[in-house]
Image: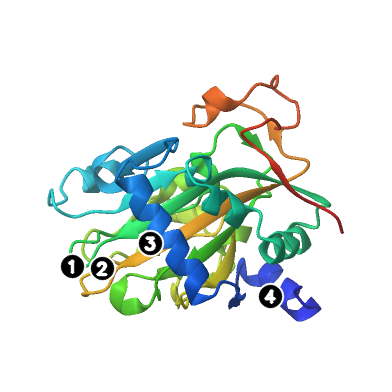
């Protein structure tokens, strides 16, 4: 469980490093499962598998079109549907308890999970973005993501970077951009930034098996992986129990939604993974 100081840090900064919650053996099992899914050896398929850099993601489409064809960020959405081991991971008791503390919610559901794998040498950047604008079927913006490193994620191999307190600046996803040379974030409309704030990213280095939490409005991005090391991670996006289906756009998970607009988002594709507090 998190202590009061950690909860306050998350509320203030928008992100928090948790502890190492998976053993090396548990991480190795998940990596083995990831290999099986990517090789189409699992009984079921995930919802989506793609190279994020060469598919329109809504982030920096002009930059995406200029990337070398071998530059890669492998994205897998809802690997839990293809792997019992990953389904067990999204229900990890420690993670779910701590997300429940951060969201102050007695109930958590899975919105979806997401693998991001940056191979050695050719791993591409993650453009600066907020998660929530990519989910135009959910309200309100109260989701928290649990990001677990399946390899050490350090500056050298493309760890995430965060802009502290940016989760407090609202939904600015349509204006958040990435400098093509420095990979630093900037707003195409600078007036949207609160007066006096500093948009200075800090590295979010995470050990293998360690969890990091971030708010769905947090600005985050990552540099390319030019090292000889892999950078694999599993992010699970958790919904507090009051999240509703309010479609204002489309999403790859929308075909799995079977509630009416305005209703609590629930169903088999969005399992309850925590009920407590």
Q: Which of marks 4 and 2 precedes in the sequence? A: 4
Residue located at (47% from left, 45% from top): 79
Which residue is more in the foreground, 263 or 91?
Answer: 91
Image x and y of residue 40, in percent: 32, 40
- The circle on residue 9 is 4
Query: Image quadrant of residue 165?
Result: bottom right
Q: Residues within 10 Å of mark 4 (few under 14, many from 20)?
A: few
> Residues at badges 4 and 1 in contact (C-beta under 8 Å)?
no
Q: Are marks 3 and 1 in contact (CB under 8 Å)?
A: no
Q: Position of residue 49 (x, y in %)?
A: 35, 41
Give the residue pinned by disc 3.
185
User: Which of the two marks, 3 or 1, is nearer to us in this view?
Assistant: 1
Residue ID at (29%, 64%):
183
Mark nearer the viewer, 4 or 3: 4
Vertical comparison of 265 with 225: above or below: above
Give whichever of discs 1 and 2 has the lower sequence position: 1
């Amino acid at each position: 469980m998190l202590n009061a100081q950690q909860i306050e840090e998350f509320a203030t900064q928008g992100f928090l490093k948790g502890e190492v919650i998976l053993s090396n053996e548990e991480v190795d099992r998940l990596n083995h499962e990831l290999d099986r899914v990517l090789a189409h050896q699992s009984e079921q398929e995930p919802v989506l598998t793609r190279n994020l850099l060469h598919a329109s993601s809504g982030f920096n489409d002009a930059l995406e079109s200029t990337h070398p064809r071998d530059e890669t960020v492998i994205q897998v959405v809802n690997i839990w549907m293809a792997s019992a081991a990953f389904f067990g991971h999204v229900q990890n008791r420690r993670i779910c308890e701590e997300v429940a503390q951060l969201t102050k919610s007695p109930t958590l559901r899975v919105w979806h999970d997401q693998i991001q794998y940056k191979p050695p040498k050719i791993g591409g950047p993650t453009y600066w973005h907020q998660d929530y604008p990519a989910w135009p079927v959910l309200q309100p913006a109260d989701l928290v993501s649990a990001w677990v490193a399946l390899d050490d994620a350090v500056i050298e191999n493309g760890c995430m970077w965060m802009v502290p307190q940016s989760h407090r600046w609202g939904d600015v996803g349509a204006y958040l951009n990435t400098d093509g040379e420095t990979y630093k974030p900037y707003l195409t409309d600078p007036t949207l930034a609160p007066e006096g704030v500093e948009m200075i990213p800090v590295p979010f280095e995470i050990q293998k098996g360690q969890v990091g939490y971030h708010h769905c409005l947090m600005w985050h991005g990552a540099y390319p992986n030019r090292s000889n090391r892999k950078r694999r991670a599993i992010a699970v996006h958790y919904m507090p129990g009051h999240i509703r289906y309010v479609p204002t756009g489309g999403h790859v998970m929308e075909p799995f939604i079977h509630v009416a607009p305005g209703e609590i988002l629930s169903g088999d594709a969005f399992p309850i993974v925590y009920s407590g507090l």
